[in-house]
Image (cartoon, rainbow, N blue to C red):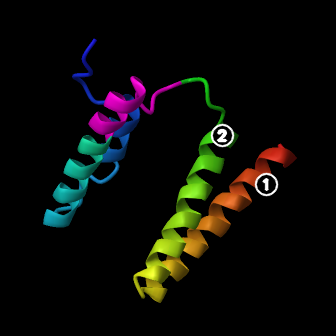
Amino acid sequence: MKHKTLSLNTQRVILSVQDIESNLKDRVIEMIIEREKKGYEKYKQTMDRRDYTKRDWLTHLLEELLDAAQYAMAADEPDLAEQFMYDCMNVLNKIDRLEIV
């Protein structure tokens, strides 16, 4: 079975920036679509999978952001690394709050 339509999550990400007019936005959307296609080819499923909990998704996001902070610093972009670190703290806070609820 060949994957032809965008996953619901990809559609939602694209819609979240629909009011922004930018060539960069258009390029990023194209990249997201290509990554979804590549991911589907590799894993035969989209990001709409239901076997992950919210904690699982947030943990995966945190791991990706931690890597992004290190990539940014390796590229000698400390401002980007700092922003990713703030994003990491925000996601970690959300994970911690899941335990409270």
For the residue pair 72 and 99, the one nearer the viewer reads as 72
Query: In the current view of this chain or complex, which residue is farthest to the right?
Result: 100
Over which residues does the magenta segment extend? 36-49
What is the distance, in whole Å, between disc 2 and disc 1 at their CAs? 13 Å
The residue labelled by disc 1 is 96
Q: Is residue 22 visible?
A: no
Residue 10 spot, x, y in % from top left: 35, 38
Q: Residue at x 59, y 48 (%)?
A: 60
For the residue pair 2 and 51, the one nearer the viewer reads as 2
Residue 25 spot, x, y in % from top left: 22, 60
For the residue pair 88 and 76, the one nearer the viewer reads as 76
Element marked by disc 1 = helix
Tell me if residue 73 is in the magenta stretch: no
Q: Residue at x 42, y 88 (%)?
A: 76
Quarter residue 92 falls in: bottom right
Residue type of the residue flagged with mark 1:
Asp
Tell me if residue 41 is in the magenta stretch: yes
Q: Residue at x 72, y 61 (%)?
A: 93
Q: Which quadrant is home to the C terminus?
A: top right
Q: Is residue 26 above or below residue 42?
A: below
Residue type of the residue flagged with mark 2:
Asp
The residue labelled by disc 2 is 56
Residue 55 spot, x, y in % from top left: 69, 42
